């Protein structure tokens, strides 16, 4: 009996030890094990919510691709370039000696035509065939072809364009087309979904179907340097990390509702490919000028003719200002609206037409939107004293990379457009100033085009008369009746007289 009691006590002690051991194991397990047991129901619910959210987003993206995708078109362009002089290469690469040799002994080489192609995107904004795209997509095109997502191709007609905003309208002869809904870009917020749609590699993949890339609005009200825009106004842009590649230009950037909030225009890249930063023109910018673009009217922008500088704390202290709002006039162009109105260098502009001016971007925007010819009261600080002056808004000339460069141009003549060689142009392109004028544009199919004149040519003589300025050019062409003998930096060319019936 004693043995049985001992055995019983041993079993009891062993059971207690086992229980203690099991209890200890539970205690020293990582706390998240207990939490997983306790919160299994909550985690399951949260996981389900996350999955549902992703499914909801996927559904929205799929819906956008289905509904907005058909409104996006591929825009292909053709450019005809005429070349008379080729560049020659020796076995060791380019050699100027060989180039001069062939120029000297084979002057009568035939002119060759080269066809270049461009590719972009566009978005249908009217069921009768009006398409919104970038101006740079169709700039200088001799032929525009629009391809719909169903594979149909149409010849595109350029209805209206605006270089400054980089927007254009193409018209195709089609009816009952799907139309994209234009949203409100002023409501765009950092962090919201952004979907870029376009056809960047349509020819490469041989498909008319657009691509859809997804990201977020990563910044708003972005400004690209003037040097990048080449005279265009790339301010107030929407920045996104949705993949935008070459060929996406002109396609829409849409929100999660499928509304167009921007027109894709540029990427920031060191390699030419996508690196996570793309830009779109706010659709409200397009809305402001759509009617005039469709009607083919020139888009006018207000202009003062000044260079500006933002305020900083030191300048604000100097002018005894309580804040850093306003801009300083750094330069006033001669004979500009600003000069005629009495603005001077060193003036601080604080108010414009009754509105407070926060910074340079704000003033540029309000001046650009002002009516041409309207007299505006400008509130300035001069010699640390507030005073009003009245300035009459002028029309902004296109292509001014810096307000400090006012480039004089000549009127189109026989398809030829020219500009004065300014000190900046002479320095930039290593041209001797005072020795001719430079060809800025040649109209396709014109007499100048048929003669072989190309943009970039420098005209030094016309009918054996020296040309050193725009005034010389204007005086000479007004006296020409028949064919004109023009000497350029590449040699002599004959521009035919207009044909008469």
Image (cartoon, rainbow, N blue to C red):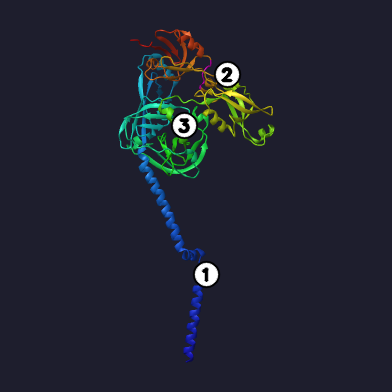
Residue at (37%, 31%) from the top-left corner?
130
Q: Is residue 382 left or right of residue 334?
A: right
Q: Main secondary structure of the magenta part?
A: loop
Region of the chain picked out in magenta, as a range: 429-433
- Percent across and percent down for residue 9 are 50, 85
Viewer-side residue, 478 vs 273: 478
Quarter of the rendering containing residue 116: top left
Q: Report crowding for label 2: few under 14, some 14 to 19, many 20 or more residues within 10 A (C-alpha).
A: few
In the image, residue 155 sits, relative to residue 187, either above or below, namely above
- Percent across and percent down for residue 8 are 47, 86
Q: Which residue is mark 2?
A: 335
In the image, residue 225 sits, relative to residue 31, either above or below, namely above
Viewer-side residue, 98 vs 196: 196
Name the mark on residue 288: 3
Residue 196 in view of the camera: yes
- Percent across and percent down for residue 178 are 35, 37
Q: Mark 1 or mark 2: which comes first in sequence?
A: 1
Quarter of the rendering containing residue 496: top left
Q: Mark 2 or mark 3: which comes first in sequence?
A: 3
Secondary structure at badge 3 equals: helix
């Amino acid at each position: 009996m004693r043995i049985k009691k001992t055995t019983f006590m041993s079993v009891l002690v062993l059971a207690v030890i086992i229980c203690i051991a099991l209890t200890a194991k539970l205690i020293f397990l990582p706390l998240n094990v207990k939490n997983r047991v306790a919160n299994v129901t909550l985690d399951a619910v949260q996981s389900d919510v996350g999955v549902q959210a992703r499914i909801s987003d996927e559904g929205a993206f799929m819906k956008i691709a289905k509904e907005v995708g058909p409104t996006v078109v591929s825009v292909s362009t053709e450019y005809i370039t005429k070349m008379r002089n080729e560049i020659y290469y020796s076995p060791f690469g380019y050699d100027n000696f060989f180039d001069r040799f062939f120029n000297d002994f084979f002057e009568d080489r035939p002119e060759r035509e080269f066809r270049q192609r461009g590719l972009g995107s566009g978005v249908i904004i009217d069921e009768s065939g009006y398409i919104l795209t970038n101006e740079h997509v169709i700039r200088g095109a001799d032929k525009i072809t629009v391809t719909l997502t169903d594979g149909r191709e149409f010849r595109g007609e350029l209805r209206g364009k605006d270089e400054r905003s980089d927007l254009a309208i193409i018209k195709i002869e089609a009816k009952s087309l799907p139309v994209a809904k234009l949203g409100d870009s002023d409501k765009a917020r950092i962090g919201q979904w952004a979907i870029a749609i376009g056809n960047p590699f349509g020819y490469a993949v041989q498909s008319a179907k657009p691509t859809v890339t997804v990201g977020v609005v990563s910044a708003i009200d972005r400004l690209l340097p003037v040097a990048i825009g080449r005279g265009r106004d790339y301010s107030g842009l929407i920045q996104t990390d949705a993949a935008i590649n070459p060929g996406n230009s002109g396609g829409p950037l849409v929100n999660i509702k499928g509304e167009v909030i921007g027109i894709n225009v540029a990427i920031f890249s060191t390699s030419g490919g996508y690196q996570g930063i793309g830009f779109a023109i706010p659709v409200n910018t397009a809305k402001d000028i759509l009617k005039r673009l469709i009607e083919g009217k020139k888009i006018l922008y207000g202009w003062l003719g000044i260079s500006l500088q933002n305020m900083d704390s030191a300048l604000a202290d100097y002018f005894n200002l309580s804040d850093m709002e306003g801009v300083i006039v750094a330069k006033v162009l001669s004979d500009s609206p600003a000069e005629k109105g009495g603005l001077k260098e060193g003036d601080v502009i604080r108010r414009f037409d009754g509105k407070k001016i926060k910074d340079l971007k704000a003033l540029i925007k309000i001046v650009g939107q002002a009516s041409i010819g309207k007299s505006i009261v400008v509130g300035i600080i001069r010699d640390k004293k507030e005073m009003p002056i009245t300035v009459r808004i002028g029309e902004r000339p296109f292509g001014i990379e810096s307000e400090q460069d006012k480039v004089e141009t000549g009127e189109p003549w026989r398809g030829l457009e020219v500009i004065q060689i300014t000190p900046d142009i002479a320095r930039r392109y290593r041209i001797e100033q005072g020795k001719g004028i430079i060809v800025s544009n040649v109209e396709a199919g014109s007499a100048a085009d048929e003669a072989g004149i190309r943009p970039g040519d420098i005209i030094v003589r016309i009918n054996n008369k020296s040309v050193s300025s725009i005034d010389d050019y204007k005086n000479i062409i007004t006296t020409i009746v028949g064919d004109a003998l023009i000497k350029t930096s590449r040699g002599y060319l004959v521009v035919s007289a207009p044909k008469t019936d």
